[in-house]
């Protein structure tokens, strides 16, 4: 989204976190101000008390219906986004878990291969040592005393 053509103070306010007209709190204040303005206009209108009360009741009824519709729309949008977020998060967690399982399996295979190689090396060395011990004559103590 390009910020071209947007006054600098608007982009600066966004960066600083200052709410604007189209933020949630800005929109709430705007609607609240509109409602107060409409109520004041109705109170100062040149109508009889009965007509004024009827107009206020109609305006209130319309406002409540509109608010319910908007709340329902916001609820549906939020529900859809939450469902989408949940699905995406669930898929990402599943992918990460699968990758972790694969890595554990791979490392387990590497560890098993290292253990097997160590066992083979031990057995080979033991066999070599035993066969060389059979080939060499056993040392005797009296031969060591003659040299000394």
Image (cartoon, helix red, strand yellow):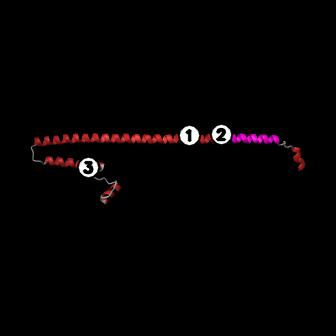
Q: Is 75 located above or below residue 18 in the figure?
A: above
- As drawn, the label of residue 116 is 2
- Given residues 135 and 42, the one toward you in this image is 135
Which residue is located at x 38 percent, y 41 percent?
A: 84
Q: Residues within 10 Å of mark 3 (few under 14, many from 20)?
A: few
x and y percent of residue 85 in the render? 39, 42
- As drawn, the label of residue 105 is 1
Query: Is 60 situated left or right of 104 in this image?
Result: left
Distance between the alpha carbons at the discs numbered 3 and 1 = 57 Å
Q: Earlier in the sequence, mark 2 or mark 3?
A: 3
Of all residues, the one furthest to the bottom in this rendering is 8
Distance between the alpha carbons at the discs numbered 2 and 1 = 16 Å
Distance between the alpha carbons at the discs numbered 2 and 3 = 73 Å
Residue wearing tag 3 = 29
Q: Residues within 10 Å of mark 2 (few under 14, many from 20)?
A: few
Start-end of magenta stretch: 116-135
Which residue is located at x 26 percent, y 49 percent?
A: 29
Indicate yes or no whether the magenta region holds residue 60: no
* Magenta-drawn stretch, dominant element (helix, strand or loop): helix
Q: Earlier in the sequence, mark 2 or mark 1?
A: 1
């Amino acid at each position: 989204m390009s910020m071209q053509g947007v006054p600098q103070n608007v982009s600066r306010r966004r960066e600083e976190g200052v709410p604007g007209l189209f933020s949630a709190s800005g929109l709430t204040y705007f609607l609240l101000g509109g409602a107060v303005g409409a109520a004041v206009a109705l109170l100062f209108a040149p109508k009889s008390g009965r007509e004024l009360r009827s107009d206020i009741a109609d305006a209130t009824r319309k406002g409540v219906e509109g608010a319910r519709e908007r709340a329902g729309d916001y609820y549906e949008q939020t529900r859809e986004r939450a469902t989408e977020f949940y699905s995406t998060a669930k898929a990402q967690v599943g992918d990460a878990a699968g990758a972790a399982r694969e890595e554990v399996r791979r490392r387990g295979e590497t560890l098993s291969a290292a253990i097997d190689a160590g066992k083979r090396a031990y057995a080979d060395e033991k066999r070599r040592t035993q066969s060389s011990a059979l080939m060499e004559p056993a040392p005797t103590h009296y031969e060591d005393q003659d040299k000394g």
